[in-house]
Structures are given as structure tokens and as C-alpha cells.
Amino acid sequence: MQVRVRAPGRAARAGDDLRTTVTFSDPESLPLPLRIHFVSLEDPQTGERELRNVGMELGEAPRDKEIAVGLPALTALALRHVVERYPHYVELARAHVFVDLDQDTSRLTSATKRPKPARIDRDWLRMIAAEYQRHVQEGEPAPITAIAKSHGVTPSAASRWVKAARSQHLLDEGA
């Protein structure tokens, strides 16, 4: 599965799109790209921040008729797939966006675009833990194999990631 994160720049002004968008693309399991939108909100009284899911899009917006002819149609099966798994997609998107919200959002984009980090960090392990939990909740008989396939690595590498997520207390021991 290919995942892209687009965050608003530091110089975003009123009227600009202030959403952080996570796009999932996977022709095997998701025939159309899925975009999940978040905004960062702050409670002025408490100072607490929240990353709120404010929308989603499924499919492409064609620029002209020639491009539209080549795009796959939105089917009831594809829509059902997304609706049934939407909470899991949101959780996985949050894991990709997960950073301290005080952090500079221009660093957010570069930090989450990579397919896998050169050095495994806590954000990566949080995303792997969320993906593992999603597979388990969906009844996947081999969640580690599914993670390996989605990231193009061996099951042994995926197993090390899950073990590291457990050791960081990002995943329950029983899961």
C-alpha cells in the first residue's frame, strides 16, 4: 500500500486549505485512491490539541474526458470495502500523521512520506502497530504476512517490526 501525507505549509493563511490529507493507494485491495482529511484544532481555554477527521474522498477528479475514460468506476463493492474498514483507515492515517502537533508541519510531510525509514523510529512502529491491530480485528489469519506484503519486505522483517512495537508498549502483548 502506498501512503502519501500532505500537510499545510507554515505560511498557510485564512482561506487556504488547512487540512492534512493522507492518501492511500493500493490497486490490489483499494481500486480507487482514498483520501482522509484532518484538521488540527486547539481548545483556547485548555490549550489541548486534537487531530480531527473532517472528511474523506474516494476516487480521482479527472482533469479532462480522455483521462476520465481510463479511470476505474466507483462500484458498490469498492464503496462497501471502504465503509466497512473506514475506522481502520482513519486509525492508520492518524498513525502516519502522528507527531507532536506542536511540531513544524513542514517537517511532518517529509517525515511521513518515506515508504520505510532507514532507522526504525517510534512513529513507524506506531503505524505498524495500528496496521497489525487492523489486520487482527478484520480476522486476517496471518497479519504479519499481510504487513510484509503491504510494505514489500520479508515476513521476518515485519515480525521484527511487530516485536519492536510490542517492546515499545504500542501493541498489547496478547495481540
Image (tube, rainbow, N blue to C red):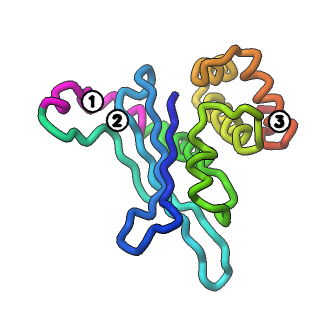
Contact (Cβ within 8 Å) of mark 1 with mark 2: yes
Front-most of residues 161 and 115? 115
Expressed as whole percent of the image width and height from the top left, the position of residue 25 reads: 44, 32
Viewer-nearest of discs 2 and 3: 3
Say which residue label 3 marks. 166
Residue 72, picture quadrant: top left
* Residue 49 in the image: above or below residue 4: below
Amino acid type, callout 3: Arg
Q: Is residue 141 visible?
A: no
Residue at the image point whose x is 59% and y is 46% from the top: 110
**Which sits earlier in the primary sequence, circle 2 or circle 3?**
2
Q: Residues within 10 Å of mark 2 (few under 14, many from 20)?
A: some
Disc 2 and disc 3: Cα gap in Å? Answer: 33 Å
Kindly identify the residue that appears in the image at 65 percent across and 31 percent down: 116
Query: What secondary structure is marked by label 3?
Result: helix
- Marker disc for residue 58: none
Stretch in magenta: 66-82
The outermost residue toward the right is 167
Q: Residue furthest front?
A: 11
Q: Secondary structure at mark 2?
A: helix
Residue named by callout 2: 79
Q: For the residues carrying marks 1 and 3, which lies nearer the camera in this image? A: 3
On screen, residue 21 above or below 141: below
Q: Badge 1 is on which residue?
A: 75
Labels 1 and 3: the sequence-earlier one:
1
For the stretch drawn in magenta, the main secondary structure is helix
Q: CA distance from mark 1 to mark 3?
A: 38 Å
Residue 96 on image: x %, y %: 60, 44
